[in-house]
Image: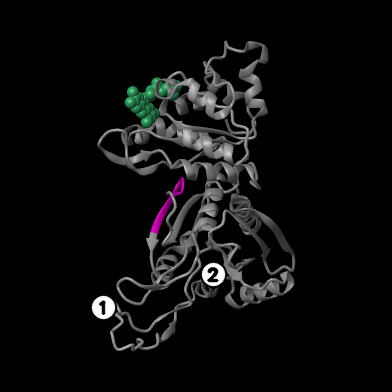
Amino acid sequence: MCDLLRRLKEFGYDVRVVPTASALKFVGRPTWEALSGQSASSDIWEEVQDVPHVAIGQKADLVIIAPATADLMSKAATGRADDLLTSVLLTTRAPVIFAPAMHTEMWEHPATVANVETLRSRGAIVIEPSVGRLTGPDSGTGRLAEPASLASVCRAALEGGSGSADLAGRRVLVTAGGTREPLDPVRFLGNRSSGRQGWALAAAAAARGASVKLIAANVDLPEPAGSQVIRVETTSQMFDAVLAEAGEYDAVVMAAAVADFRSTSVANRKIKKDDSGNVPEPIELVRNPDILAALGEKWSQSPTPVVVGFAAETISDEQDREAVGEAKRAAKGANVIVVNEVGVELGFESALNSASILDGSGVVIHVPQTSKEELANAVWDAVIARLPRAERGTEFPAG
Ligand SMILES: Cc1cc2nc3c(=O)[nH]c(=O)nc-3n(C[C@H](O)[C@H](O)[C@H](O)COP(=O)(O)O)c2cc1C
């Protein structure tokens, strides 16, 4: 969590650490104070002149409890306030995110399950823990989400987020990364997509309470917090994975950069140059299945899933780019299309992005150069506007 603190500071946020007494047995107060540049008291009887048990919660724009122990969630669920952190939870009206970490047995215990349900019913976000190595030699559900992905969830909650769990109870499917079409056992046709925009969409959806599945092609980023990840490599594999599941979701957001073509043949052995100066046979290409068009064809007339496509265009004129994007949206039968300009310095591999969001109504939402999390929130706003209203999620306050 020192790493999480560092990342939040690097985003420019003012971070106050409120450790529990037990937390200080793992990492000492001087570490928190040096990294945050602020007092890191855990005691309501310190600095009483500032009334910290009220002031800290009132001042916060966001509270994240990471790692959230079984004990802390139990206290939060019953409204205990016997130390500084639990008092903050009662005084804050900001969004509250719990990032649980514990052994599988503790996570699955009916008491913990009930506490998580109570916290969620009040509008708190409880991130699903990861599956993986736990404190001891064992593995299972209950591993704390990766610090980098928790930082992304915080950023999503703070930048363009709705401040509410308005995707609670919703299931969303997101594709991310760039597909690779093999030429031989070691070479492929690919693209420069890093998967960051898809990861940010997952973080933003998790920060708004959704249950998220990511279908990721060749992404080398820390596991996203609270999302289940299915790994694929090629467009055909992504097509199969998306089409098999899309109907079970409220929204499908296709942020992956998929190869439109693949080679007609894949060599069994590495293609070699020889000494005669010959060049290999030209690569013959064939069209890949169009995932967005297949989704549009199947679901454009139903309220869910809301189908969102991304159109990465190398057209610098905004109006021309949007016209191409809208034509693509209509042709594919997508509900919403997110059009962005890509180029050597733009879009791919960067932490920033800008885009226009078009939903066929003629209204265009322009999102100027900003964090990928903020753009992700604008996309979810467009999705939520199209979801059947009655089933919308809970409002904060949450603590
Ligand atoms: C080495 C060690 C690791 C622990 N790991 C966890 C954990 O991952 N999750 C958890 O809920 N409790 C864990 N505990 C138990 C908590 O520390 C204990 O419940 C404590 O009372 C929590 O206090 P707090 O909720 O005020 O921080 C661990 C204890 C020890 C000694």
> Residue 317 lies in magenta, yes or no?
no
Q: Amino acid at mark 1?
A: Asn
Q: Which residue is mark 1?
A: 268
On whether residue 226 falls in the magenta region, the answer is yes
Question: In this view of the protein, which residue sits in the foreground, 93 or 374?
Answer: 374
Question: Which of the four quarters of the rendered structure image does ligand 1 lie in?
Answer: top left
Position of the C terminus by quadrant: top right
Q: Looking at the image, which residue is at 48% across and 25% down?
A: 31
237 with respect to 343 (left or right): left
Residue 277 picture quarter: bottom left
Q: Position of residue 275 (x, y in %)?
A: 28, 85
Q: Is residue 135 left or right of residue 95?
A: left
Question: Under tag 2, what secondary structure?
Answer: helix
Q: Circle 1 — which element?
A: loop
**Residue identifier under label 2:** 299
Task: Tell me where residue 24 appears, x and y as whole percent.
Answer: 44, 21
Question: Can residue 48 be seen here?
Answer: yes
Answer whether labels 1 and 2 touch (C-beta < 8 Å): no
Tell me the quarter of the picture where residue 320 sits. bottom right
